């Protein structure tokens, strides 16, 4: 496992943190959108209090390490790699706590099959090895979502829920699939949800213990964390080459294992 300093360097070099690919104007556009309560950017966290645009920017600077200066409107934005590592360790501790109870029940989901899936797969493998039941509700549940012209459905790969579009796993912010999964589970809820995007937002909105990952242009989960609806959010670029997440994943899995 890389040392903290080595991991920090790797996060910056691969642009998982540091000067990330997401441009500043895109970040600010999304912060304005959530201040205007655009459902697409709320990620299912519909009971968030009203946040003004300056408040969103301030919280993102605190939680993710984006540039706090509102006058910085174009060019590069940043994620603080130390915040990434600190949140990663906190997420590992939360997962370890969930796995330490008798007969733990976990639920995994990702809206980033081309990026964060590799992190979820490693955590899910560890959870199974430690005796957890990984829930797979609402498999093949299908719906017509906004912005696409045909049905998409929930499908699982090694117990990770994703959205399938005619045989291909797709990127999504939509909370509707997680809402359907939780509706099928009813009172038989998971002990912890590990997710991102709307999968995490919908779980947090439902009052289920939730941890997850979010990019600097996805403020909803960070606001949910500030309000206590999400337990831990790890700030990172959520769609770099999958192999770049290997050191981060190794630290995560190792910390969980050592805590058990």
Image (cartoon, helix red, strand yellow):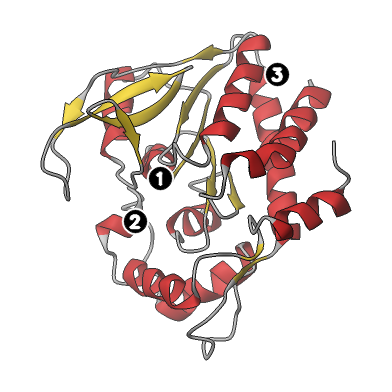
Residue 216 in the image: state x and y as whole percent. 52, 62
Tag 1 and tag 2, C-beta contact below 8 Å: yes
214 over 30 or under it: above or below: above
- Comparing marks 1 and 3, which lies closer to the viewer? 1
- The N terminus is located in which quarter? top right
Alpha carbons under labels 3 and 2: distance apart: 32 Å
Residue 22 in the image: state x and y as whole percent. 50, 66
Which quarter of the picture shows residue 65? bottom right
Q: Residue pushed farthest bottom?
A: 71
Q: Label 3 crowding class (10 Å Cα cut-off): few <14, some 14-19, many 20+? A: some
To which residue does mark 2 refer? 42
152 over 82 or under it: above or below: above
Give the SS element for disc 2. Answer: helix
Q: Label 1 crowding class (10 Å Cα cut-off): few <14, some 14-19, many 20+? A: many
To which residue does mark 1 refer? 201
Report the residue at 29% width, 71% height from top. 36
Residue 34 in the image: state x and y as whole percent. 35, 66
- Comparing marks 3 and 2, which lies closer to the viewer? 2
N-terminal label among 1 and 2: 2
N-terminal label among 3 and 2: 2
Specify whether 55 is left or right of 13.
left
Number of residue marks: 3
Alpha carbons under labels 1 and 2: distance apart: 8 Å
80 over 129 or under it: above or below: below
């Amino acid at each position: 496992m890389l040392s903290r300093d080595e991991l920090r360097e790797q996060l910056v070099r691969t642009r998982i943190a540091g000067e990330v690919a997401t441009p500043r104007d895109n970040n600010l556009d999304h912060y304005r959108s959530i201040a205007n309560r655009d459902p697409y950017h709320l990620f299912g966290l519909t009971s968030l209090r009203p946040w003004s645009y300056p408040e969103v920017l301030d919280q993102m600077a605190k939680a993710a390490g984006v540039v706090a200066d509102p006058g910085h409107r174009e060019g590069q934005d940043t994620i603080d790699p130390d915040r990434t590592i600190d949140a990663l360790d906190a997420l590992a501790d939360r997962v370890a706590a969930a796995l330490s109870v008798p007969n733990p029940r976990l639920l995994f989901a990702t809206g980033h099959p081309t990026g964060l899936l590799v992190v979820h797969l490693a955590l899910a493998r560890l959870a199974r090895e430690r005796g957890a039941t990984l829930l797979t509700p609402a498999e093949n549940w299908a719906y017509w979502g906004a912005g696409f012209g045909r049905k998409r459905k929930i499908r699982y790969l090694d117990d990770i829920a994703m959205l399938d579009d005619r045989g291909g796993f797709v990127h999504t912010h939509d909370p509707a699939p997680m809402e359907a999964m939780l509706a099928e589970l009813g009172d038989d809820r998971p002990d912890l949800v590990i997710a991102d995007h709307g999968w995490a937002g919908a779980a947090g909105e439902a009052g289920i213990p939730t941890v997850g990952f979010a990019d600097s242009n996805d403020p909803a989960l960070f606001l949910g964390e500030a309000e206590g609806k999400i337990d831990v959010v790890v700030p990172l670029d959520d769609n770099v080459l999958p192999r770049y997440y290997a050191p981060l994943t190794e630290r995560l899995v190792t910390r969980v294992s050592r805590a058990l």
